[in-house]
Image: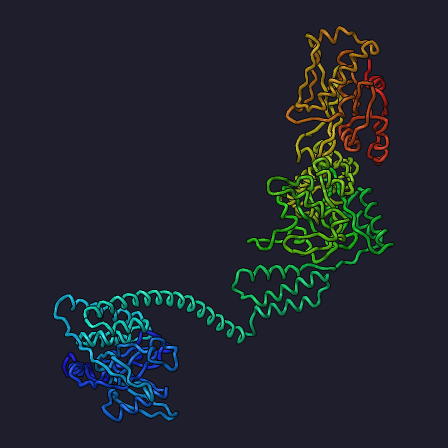
Amino acid sequence: MRDDRLSKEALDMNIEQFLLRSEDEMDFLPIIPLNESDQEDLNGIEIPAEIALLPLRNTVLFPGVVLPITVGRDKSIKAVNEAYKTDKLIGVVAQKDSSVEDPAIKDLEQIGTVAKIVKLIKMPDGGTTIIIQGKSRFYIESILEDDPYFKAKIKKLEEEESPKDNDFDAYIANIKDLAADIVQLSPNIPTEASIILRNIENPSFLIHFVSSNLNTDIKDKQRLLELNQIRQRADLLMQLLQKELQFVELKNKVTTKTRTELDKQQREYFLQQQMKSIKEELGGDSNLQEIKEMQKKAEAKKWPAAAKEMFKKGVEKLERMHPSTPDFSVVYNHLDLMLDLPWEQYTEDHYELKKARKALDTDHYGMHKIKERILEYLAVLKLKGDMKSPILCFVGPPGIGKTSLGRSIANAIGRKYVRLSLGGLHDESEIRGHRKTYIGAMPGRILQSIRKVKSSNPVMILDEIDKVGSDFRGDPSSALLEVLDPEQNHTFYDNYLESEYDLSKVLFIATANNFQNIQPALRDRMEVIDLSGYAVEEKIEIAKRHLVPKQQDLHGLKSSHFKISDKVLEKIIQDYTRESGVRELDRQLASIMRFQARELVSNGKLKAIVTAEDIEKILGKSKYSNEIYKTANMAGVAIGLAWTYVGGEILFIETSLSDGKGELKLTGNLGNVMKESASTALTYLQSNAKKYNLDSILFEKKNIHIHVPEGAVPKDGPSAGVTMMSAIASALTGKRVKPFLAMTGEITLRGQVLPVGGIKEKVLAAKRAGLKEIILCWQNEKDVQEINPAFIKGIKFHYVKTMNQVLEKALVG
């Protein structure tokens, strides 16, 4: 077979594979002619002057192209049967409007193609299928009949010879390339189609064949058929192919993109299905299993109706979500929190007051005021059965056991214990929680603590509440207003939980060193209980009962029997510590235990009793001494008492006179209030100079310099007023202040002495320092009476109302 001829298999191939349009857009199927050489005799065929017409919808028949057509209309069937009986030639014309079911003369195009009926097939359903091959174009001059079928007088249109120039050859080559590109980009057309196109040698047939299979509008195909010049036909076809190629490229791009997305989704879907099958084989889907377990836990929960409804909606939402979605973990963690919270779960309180008192006394020595308050709370709880927990605030110097007392209270009343450290807290979300939509969001520390202890009525220690920070990120102390208000905390709202939670049964105990640093609105919500420092006697008992046994256990000396007498403990307390609490004492005892442990390891035995000499050998020479108060006994020097957040302190007020112009100079890092007290004292003495036998010239000729030692330590407050006045009076009169005498009180220009605070800490500081007499305002007598008399044994108190009484008792000749 020659190279320019198509193989039998290729020629018989159904052109359905080569169509550029979808199957549902056509009623028939064009195929390749059996022999391309038939094209050579197309112009020589004898065309009758009158011929039956076959109107076609949806397509145009071109010369040389073979089409199978299913004939369904009565007129068309009659025309086909009549033509098949005679010369088998029929005129095929396209309808102007394919939607017209029964076309009239005006609905037919003027130019069509004479076709030969190659085969007529009677179908089992009564229909007729014909295979026709286009032969030659014709023009309808007139319609002779329209019944029983269309019959027209026609004129044959001669075909122009194909030009033999390079320009036309380029047209043909371009048409082949464009058609091949379209075939390449169309996934439903096999690649063999481009090979068939390249093997078509006849330019006219190539144009007719590509035009017939072009996926374009019927009107464009009719225009191609009507053009007489083959060059014009090739030019129009090339334009339509360019348009089609652009459309196919765009369609292919969209299809590829969509397919890629679908492939990815299908891949994920198949993988998820495989994973699901594997999990089912191993014992069920873990996610569904977890959700079922959550629902099972929820059924046993006792919680409010609002929380129950919220959980139900959350579970329904979780069931609809895929585990790989980001929101799945957010919803899951939220529901997990709801399940973990002890909704309406309470521990049973111990109402036996004697046992509670014993438990408190076992853990802490002293602190009678707090213990009495806790026992009162238990008594009311026992009688009433239910009450809002009080909001307590323990205020006192560090190291006295405020925090550990909270644990003792929890043990005494049989509740869970949790501690919340607020020192340095600066973010309001730490209290109320974050919105759960944020990355890394979590509930506030209040709910986290309750979740941890699994009880809705624990003892919660809010440690260091006076050290809560406040900056641009928020004010946590304002968030605590809701937590610590008994009228509000039964509906505490956490941002993460997004629901109300009852905190009214929680026993909140706040601790603070400096009550003034707490926000006023927060102070108003708490019941303040002042905790003073320990007296020497209390520290000895604490050391014997708690500190010494603890340190022996920590240093492996529990089984070693040696004693530390009360006298030795007193020496440690007075000569090596100056504090309100017992932390420094604990450290000194730890030093002794380390020495004892070394002795035991080195010598194999220990002395039965630790003596005062042993203490000096272990701890060195005394760090503190009371002798300073004897050597400081000179004119112009007085001893004052001050309160600090670590307890009471001793202050020396030194006054010196020098020649000058009556100026007052103050040094020692004094605050404004303390400076004003010095000015008030000087003005009072100056205005009452005659009363105290003072030479008024001294105030004009002498400069007065007041200094308070330890200049690096800031000092302020009105309580040093009487001490400053006594020091100035001592310097001006030359009389010394009575030895071992301390004083504290505020003064006025009228000569009155006003009460001050922190009396217990100040009195205990004086006792620690070995002072024997204290001058106080008469209104502070009630504060002294609250101190255990055993702790202040040996101290004489002078209660005064006026500054004149102060000078009478303080100055000696």
Check the picture and name the quadrant holding the C terminus.
top right
Residue at x 39% of width, y 92% of height: 125
Residue 743 or 757: which is nearer the viewer? 757
The picture quadrant where one finds residue 477 is top right
The picture quadrant where one finds residue 178 is bottom left
Residue at x 32% of width, y 90% of height: 78
Q: Relative to 466, say whether 268 is above or below.
A: below
Residue 114 or 479: which is nearer the viewer? 114
Res. 197 visible in picture = yes
Q: Relative to 300, say whether 479 is above or below.
A: above
Label total for image = 0
x and y percentages locating residue 689 in the rendered image? 80, 10
Describe the colour scheme in one phrase.
rainbow
Residue at x 17% of width, y 85% of height: 45
Q: Residue furthest left?
A: 164
Check the picture and name the quadrant holding the N terminus.
bottom left
x and y percentages locating residue 560 in the rendered image? 70, 47
The picture quadrant where one finds residue 472 is top right
Q: Is residue 424 left or right of residue 389?
A: left
Res. 10 visible in picture = no
x and y percentages locating residue 753 in the rendered image? 82, 23
Q: Relative to 377, say whether 664 is above or below.
A: above
x and y percentages locating residue 113 in the rendered image? 25, 80
Residue at x 71% of width, y 26% of height: 716
Residue 206 or 616: which is nearer the viewer? 206
Q: Is residue 753 left or right of residue 70?
A: right
Q: Is residue 356 left or right of residue 602?
A: right
